[in-house]
Image (tube, rainbow, N blue to C red):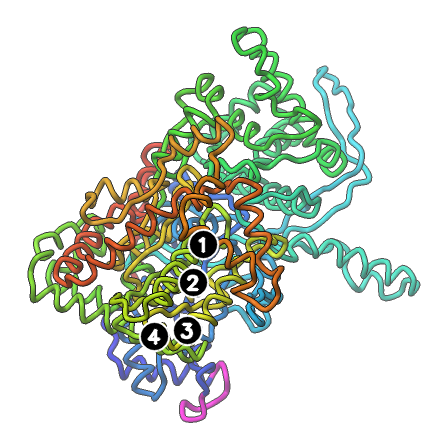
Amino acid sequence: MTNHHVDDFIKRISDKIETVSGKTIDEASERDVYVGVASIVNDEIKHKWIRTSDTYEKEKVKQVYYLSMEFLVGRLLESNLLNGGLLDVTNEAIKKIGFEPKRVYAHEHDAGLGNGGLGRLAACFLDSLASLNYPGHGCGIRYRYGLFEQRIIHGHQIELPDYWLKEDYPWETRKGDESFKIHFRGDVHMHKRIDGSLEFRYENTDQVMAVPYDIPVVGYKNETVNTLRLWSAESITREKDYLTSQQSQYYHHLDHKHSIEQISGFLYPDDSSYEGKELRLKQQYFLVSASIQHILRQYKKQQRGPLTNLPEHVVIQINDTHPSLAIPELMRLLMDDEHYGWDDAWKITNKTIAYTNHTTLSEALEKWPKTMVERLLPRIYMIINEINERFCRGLWFDHPELRNVIPELAIIADDQVHMARLAIVGSFSVNGVARLHTEILKKKEMKNFYCLFPDRFNNKTNGITHRRWLLQINRGLSRLITEVIGTNWIQRPNQLISLLRYSKDSAFLEEVDKVKLHNKRELAQFIYDRTGIAVDEYSIFDVQIKRLHEYKRQLLNIFHVIYLYNELKDNPTLDITPRTFIFGAKAAPSYHLAKEVIKLIHTVASLVNYDPDIAGKLKVVFLENYNVSLAEKIIPAADISEQISTASKEASGTGNMKMMMNGALTVGTMDGANIEIRDLVGDQHIFMFGLTADEVLAYYEYGGYNARDIYNTDERVRRILNQLNEGVFGSQEIEFKDIYYNILYHNDPYFVLKDFDPYIEIHELVEQAYRDRTTWLNKSVTNIAYSGKFSSDRTIQEYASKIWKLNQVPINKATDEQ
Ligand SMILES: *Cc1c(COP(=O)(O)O)cnc(C)c1O
């Protein structure tokens, strides 16, 4: 359906609105148009979707299942239109019937089923899998409440529930007949079979139904439509069974039903941190058990031979340790249901599951109390225990040199189940998400495991889908790129490198400048509409958008703002290039210090934005409720991308890639993928500063550095900290005391003061560079040119060839279609 004429498409939309909403096109609301267009897209997808799964089934191709507790997909209508080759015609049609396309698409509620980078990565991977014709599917949870909606009231973060299913979600299909039973708690009984093997029976378990809701994943201008399968928890007993029973029982039933539905009730809002909550453990097992049962049932239905061949047909990638119960669950199903012995089951499991590590932050490493696992998942606990026993026994006998570190390697130690250890021992591949991160895993965090299993460890630097993060969100820049280098870059993002030839072409640079200015003007309007703050579209748009976390150091950024403010107060005639500092960040609801930083940003904003001495040279904007759709608005307008994590702490980052691809220059530390960006573009096209990971890790080894020394010797720092402590930034004196104490009395664990001076200095270079437009634009284009490496297409190709051993399976066009 590529040669749609606009008028034909209008006819199609109006027919659709008539059947779906019962209105004529003249009566249709914006929402009716949204519903109508979404329904047309579904009609277009339907046959491809069936044909894709038929092909995978008939050709018995190897498939990857990407198991993740989070899929941060955002909106789908515009990207489905783009990938389906219908975006231009739809935009034209919508305009012609008197609506604004962006406003129509905005009727879709963001699917916020993720916290941040990890969940967004999963969504980008699905897009690349489908676009590259790989047979790959996502498995996740259909949370009824996504990540909370953030409101700011008087500078404080307020969390509102995100009931994203309030209106009909057009992309999901319930597949009630493909449900599975999930068992919790109960007793495990062991019986000897006649042949002497052991049989395990479960009794008195709590049973929950896992019901799949499928979402299509549309490939870019191909015939592939893969599946994102999200599981929903439902009660097994039917309502009508209770109609005749006594009232007390009925209410007991409702109570029970509610507690079951809680399992897919909400997404835990903690990013890069871990809390040992039983409901979260239930969610993890729920996802894993439903997904593995589904995988095995498909395998058997398709008659792919004995399950010993499973690793040739299926690979399961687990996104962090959250789904690592996949290991004992696959063991359980193979042994208890399929009657394999331990050794066979272990071989199959170990060759099927691969693990991606996302962090070395100790507060994020999952450890479950062993009593909790034992009570909630008795059979799973038995299996984990057996895996641990065998692993430790192997260590003792085969690696006498490691005997004294067995407690650091054991899966069960100090009454806790260590999920990362389980994941490493039970899988055939362990990958980090950027080169530095993988090196830290191998040389520090997982050194002993690396010695044991050197072949398991590998790196797969993260990526982002350039289709959404460039082609879709920055139409102006995309058009410009295509004008000079043609359309090849869309299929092969590495071809963006051809832009280098134009990186000094003044006519081209001028056009790039115009596009950026246009994008900044649009964002300025959005900022004004949302916040009432008028920002100068010619100012430097200095952007930090990401979850709020101490290691990401939004504090360092706001200290820079305070420093500039102090400078201007001392000398109001100071000639500085106007700057607009743009923040977007959600803090975990229980993360006190992070919330204090949000309050500080707002307090500084209210001081800076309206101070006549500042005369509009500085503006501070906090855009509330940072999510995928907000990111899509901000990123095309960014001049500066703030990637200033404490070196060694940010495993990869992907926000850095999105902004680079849209021509922003990075101000960054030598951390995560920033290093790989620098290696490509070269030092003259990026602003790197601060401690290296080696330096940070060396300080940690010797108990940190002395923050107070810097407080004593650097008067700029002293002034800022005193302003925090003395209430200069607020009416209540105590407001920012915790930030103050954390730096001076907990010795600045994230090296904010240590990196302060180099950060100020690098920003002075930024300012100088910005004044030279041509050089700046050259840097900007150089960044775009090299950004192709960070397409998730490259990442997925690497996973497919190196870990998954997966082939591309193009889907044939239907023969009966015109
Ligand atoms: C890309 C993205 C992230 C990850 O950003 P980082 O800067 O890598 O932490 C988080 N949230 C959203 C909504 C994103 O789109």
Q: Can residue 316 be seen in this snapshot?
A: no
Local packing at callout 1 (Cα closer than 10 Å; few below 14, some 14-19, many 20+) is many
The residue that disc 2 covers is 583
Q: Which residues are magenta?
A: 19-28
The residue type indicated by label 1 comes to Gln
Q: Can residue 381 be seen in this snapshot?
A: yes
Percent coordinates x, y for residue 653 in the rendering: 39, 47
Q: Earlier in the sequence, mark 1 or mark 2?
A: 1
Residue at the image point whose x is 47% and y is 72% from the top? 606
Q: Nearer the viewer, mark 1 or mark 3?
A: 3
Q: In this rendering, is residue 428 above or below 254?
A: above
Q: In this rendering, is residue 496 above or below 806?
A: below
The residue type indicated by label 4 comes to Gly
Local packing at callout 3 (Cα closer than 10 Å; few below 14, some 14-19, many 20+) is many
Residue at the image point whose x is 39% and y is 61% from the top? 561
The residue that disc 4 covers is 616
Percent coordinates x, y for residue 517 in the rendering: 23, 71
Q: Earlier in the sequence, mark 2 or mark 3?
A: 2
Percent coordinates x, y for residue 211 in the rendering: 62, 54
The residue type indicated by label 3 comes to Asn
- Out of 571 and 559, give the one closest to the viewer: 571
- 3D distance between C-alphas at marks 4 and 1: 22 Å
Q: Earlier in the sequence, mark 2 or mark 4?
A: 2
Which element carries disc 1, helix, strand or loop?
helix
Q: Earlier in the sequence, mark 4 or mark 1?
A: 1
- 3D distance between C-alphas at marks 2 and 4: 18 Å
